Image (cartoon, coloured by chain):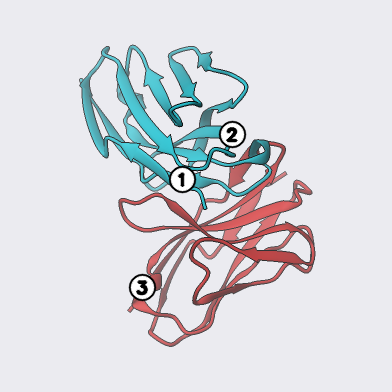
Amino acid sequence: GENVEQHPSTLSVQEGDSAVIKCTYSDSASNYFPWYKQELGKRPQLIIDIRSNVGEKKDQRIAVTLNKTAKHFSLHITETQPEDSAVYFCAASNNFGNEKLTFGTGTRLTIIP
Amino acid sequence: NAGVTQTPKFRILKIGQSMTLQCTQDMNHNYMYWYRQDPGMGLKLIYYSVGAGITDKGEVPNGYNVSRSTTEDFPLRLELAAPSQTSVYFCASMVGTSYTFGSGTRLTVV
């Protein structure tokens, strides 16, 4: 089955700086890669996703890049703000998300004011 | 439209007890999932269902059972609770590529 590894497990950045979280996946058939944000005690919320036919996708301060050859994808957050502090999870699945998601182990992002 | 509703929100069980975690969605989604999230970890898939009457095992199904008699409901059953099942349980439903998670059930087995 699919295996998703995520790094780093914790990340602290100064407010206004950029944060990058990286994930690798093992199953070359995976073709859908969402990112979730989970605030303390809350449910995961989808923040951005990318499909395998796209190399990069951007939504305001958040972007995701995908390298299918290397089987890795990354989340980029620019101009970080205190409300970006949370745990971020990457995930992968095949069949464009109509199958089960395999999650990474999460990155706890702390924005230092 | 309430989305995905999970009950209870919190529960403490004694070793060997049984319980059912309820999950209901009102979005007419065919795909539903149960995940568990251990402290500081990601979500691991327990069971999933692609439609009423169809269920399948995920990554960590041992100690759990599910049923899917209707599109709306996907209950998760623990028959003999063990301390290793202490976790936060999330139910989710999906249509297209959009997952909707419930608010979670925090279960402690003592």
Amino acid type indicated by mark 2: Tyr
SS at mark 3?
Answer: helix
The chain letter for the residue carrying disc 3 is B
* Residue in the picture at 73% in, 44% down: B1
Query: Do the residues indicated by labels 3 and 2 lie within the same chain of the protein?
Result: no
SS at mark 1?
Answer: strand
What distance separates the C-alpha of mark 2 from that of mark 1? 12 Å
- Residue A78 drawn above or below residue B107: above
Amino acid type indicated by mark 3: Ser
Q: For residue B84, which numbered disc appears in the image? A: 3
* x and y, in percent, of residue A64 in the image: 47, 21
Q: Which of pointers 2 and 1 lies earlier in the amino acid sequence?
A: 2
Q: Colour of chain A?
A: cyan
* x and y, in percent, of residue B76 in the image: 59, 69
Q: Residue furthest front?
A: A69
Q: Which residue is mark 1?
A: A103
Callouts 3 and 2 close, C-beta under 8 Å: no
Amino acid type indicated by mark 1: Phe
Q: Which residue is mark 2?
A: A32
The chain letter for the residue carrying disc 1 is A
- Residue A68 drawn above or below residue A18: below
Query: Do the residues indicated by labels 2 and 1 lie within the same chain of the protein?
Result: yes
* Residue in the picture at 49% in, 40% down: A91
* Residue in the picture at 78% in, 58% down: B71
The chain letter for the residue carrying disc 2 is A
B102 sits left or right of A76 in the view: right
Q: The C terminus of chain A is located in which quarter?
A: top left
Q: Colour of chain B?
A: red
Residue A112 visible in the picture: no
What distance separates the C-alpha of mark 1 from that of mark 3? 20 Å
* Residue in the picture at 39% in, 79% down: B82
